[in-house]
Image: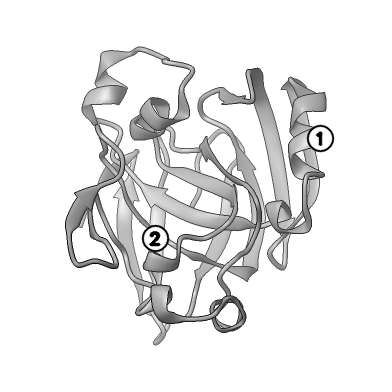
Amino acid sequence: MKNGCGTDIKIGLATGHQWIAAEEEGQDGIAFTANMPTEEIFTAPHNKKINGTVVNALPLVNNGNVIDKFKITFTDGKVTDYSAEVGYDALKNLLSSDEGVLSLGEIALIGKNSPIAESGILFFNTLFDENASCHLAFGASYPTTVKDGNSLTEEQRASLGMNSSLQHVDFMVGTKDIDIDGIGYDGKVTALFRDGEWVI
């Protein structure tokens, strides 16, 4: 994942990960949609295979605080450096809330031409704003993002690289010029995004 604003990061995915979208199936077998509107497909990063730097594309509102113009550096899955021109103390408080929040629990892909993005409105509400941009999340992974994740213990999920935290805080990193490649287990590189939009 790379753009002209300073984002340059490589994110490994959890063992057995699966990409999911709006509709999920509950443990009772009933289909439901957790967030509406929604534009994303998402999965779980491997919490020890995240290396590089991300710069936010849109402001983050967390507990009523605006955090903006921030940069986060990850080394072997953990935050090792961060800065913010707006809301530094709020970011610091977030990143000190527990150990798990220092890694990522979600990577979500959304093209730059989503309806929320094209509206040009910043809602200052992450459940809306996340639909305007590819995003990552500090903190917990969702069990459903790995095969049979709901039937696994926390220790089993951890062995797959899934992250555990009391937090799950999405922040937007997708810009109009972002490029994203997927790297297969065989090393084959496949272009997924060019200039902020799907090419596959």
Which quarter of the figure is the C terminus placed in? bottom left
Q: Is residue 98 above or below residue 45?
A: above
Residue at mark 2:
181
Count of numbered labels shown in the rendering: 2
Mark 1 or 2: in front is 1
Q: Which mark is residue 157?
A: none
In the foreground, 119 or 179: 119
Q: Which mark is residue 92?
A: 1
Residue depicted at 68% across the width and 64% down the height: 77
Tell me if I can see residue 16 in this picture: no
Q: Is residue 145 above or below residue 81?
A: below
Residue 55: x and y in percent read 61, 36
Residue 172: x and y in percent read 49, 35
Residue 101: x and y in percent read 69, 51
In the foreground, 169 or 152: 152
Residue depicted at 30% across the width and 39% down the height: 35
Q: Is residue 68 above or below residue 8?
A: above
Q: Secondary structure at mark 1?
A: helix
C-alpha gap between disc 1 and disc 2 = 31 Å
152 lies left or right of 10? left
21 lies left or right of 176? left
Label 1: how many residues lie within 10 Å, few (<14), some (14-19) or many (20+)? few
Residue depicted at 46% across the width and 60% down the height: 142
- The answer to which image quadrant residue 189 occupies is bottom left
- The answer to which image quadrant residue 42 occupies is bottom left
Label 2: how many residues lie within 10 Å, few (<14), some (14-19) or many (20+)? some
In the foreground, 118 or 28: 28
Asked if the residue at tag 2 contacts the one at tag 1, i.e. Cβ–Cβ closer than 8 Å, the answer is no
Type of amino acid under label 2: Asp
